[in-house]
Amino acid sequence: MPPIRIVTDSTADLPEEIYQQYGITKVPLKVVFGQEIFRDSIDMNIEEFYARIARGEMSTTSQPAPGEFAEVFQKLTSDGSQVLCLTLSSQMSGTYQSACLAKNMVEGDVEVIDTRSATWGIGMMVMAAARAAAEGKTKGEIKGLLHHLIAKMRFFFLVDSLDHLERGGRIGKAQAFLGTLLNIKPLLGVKDGTVHPYEKVRGKQKGIERLVQIVEQDTGGAEIVCTVLSGGDPAGREALYQKISNRLHCRQTYLGDIGPVIGNHVGIGACGIVYYTI
């Protein structure tokens, strides 16, 4: 059976050591500050990005061109390997479409999967796929695992404001929360691959408590794998992590950062949890 190679885009937000450990190939999106163009997580790291956002600088993002994916696909399939490529939700970016176009530009065995998620929601699926490939699972078995995870993945997060989501055009149905009062924090979720409003809470600490309550109610005490996320707010992530550790049944808990591309859309100060039940 030919080897199976796992490819993803940089919005999976995994640390570099994870890519190296599992042999995962990453295709970067780009972050643009004025005339400066940076490859996500390659030319600009998370600390540099949020420092610039904190200074009030404005950024935009762009997806990889089909040729960038095609170059990776061609290289990985040249020895007969099969490729599974997991991308950011097609409802949030044209990255999935770029990868699909690239698939038709090469002769090798390539399949592109829309994760319908973002950041570590993608990342946890990518790690699961890479582990399954290392265990010798077939492409069909790995695809089955991924579709199972796509259906089970849940993602709730808190933002300081909706300004970045609105400006970046990724606000989805959360536009219903625009014009909120001072110190009201929007609590949002990702559903069917897009951002949805969940509820509004007053203050960051109440928002963090509410995040934990939502997951408690949703999981009903079931065992989960989860990632606690921060968008330039390590204190908020730590507060959320402590509550989760004490109150949820976590088989595995990761601490993750929301990288520059997704950070461009949620802004500094976001925190959240992405998880699936076992």
Image (spheres, grey):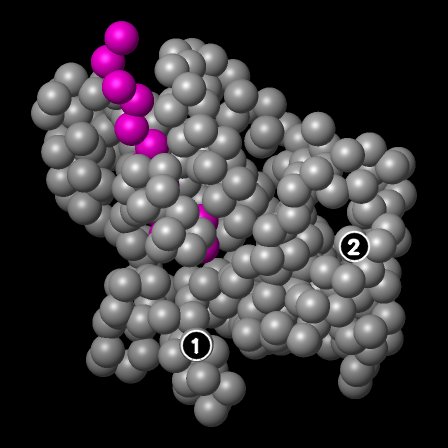
Give the class, few, some or many, for how many residues have Cα within 10 Å of label 1's Cα (few <14, many ≥20).
few
Q: Which residues are magenta?
A: 1-13
Question: Nearest the camera: 232 or 134?
Answer: 134
Q: Name the residue located 88 percent from the left edge and 36 percent from the top edge.
A: 220
Mark 2 element type = helix
Mark 1 element type = helix
Q: Position of residue 60 (x, y in %)?
A: 38, 70
Q: What residue would you read off at disc 1?
A: 47
Q: Is 263 positioned to the left or the right of 136 in the image?
A: right
53 shown above or below 116: below
If you read the primary sequence from the N terminus, does the residue marked by circle 1 or circle 2 appear first?
1
Query: Which amino acid type is marked by label 1?
Result: Glu
Tell me if I can see residue 83 in this picture: yes
Tell me if I can see residue 94 in this picture: no
Q: What residue would you read off at disc 2?
A: 244
54 shown above or below 248: below
Q: Name the residue located 52 percent from the left edge and 62 percent from the top edge.
A: 258
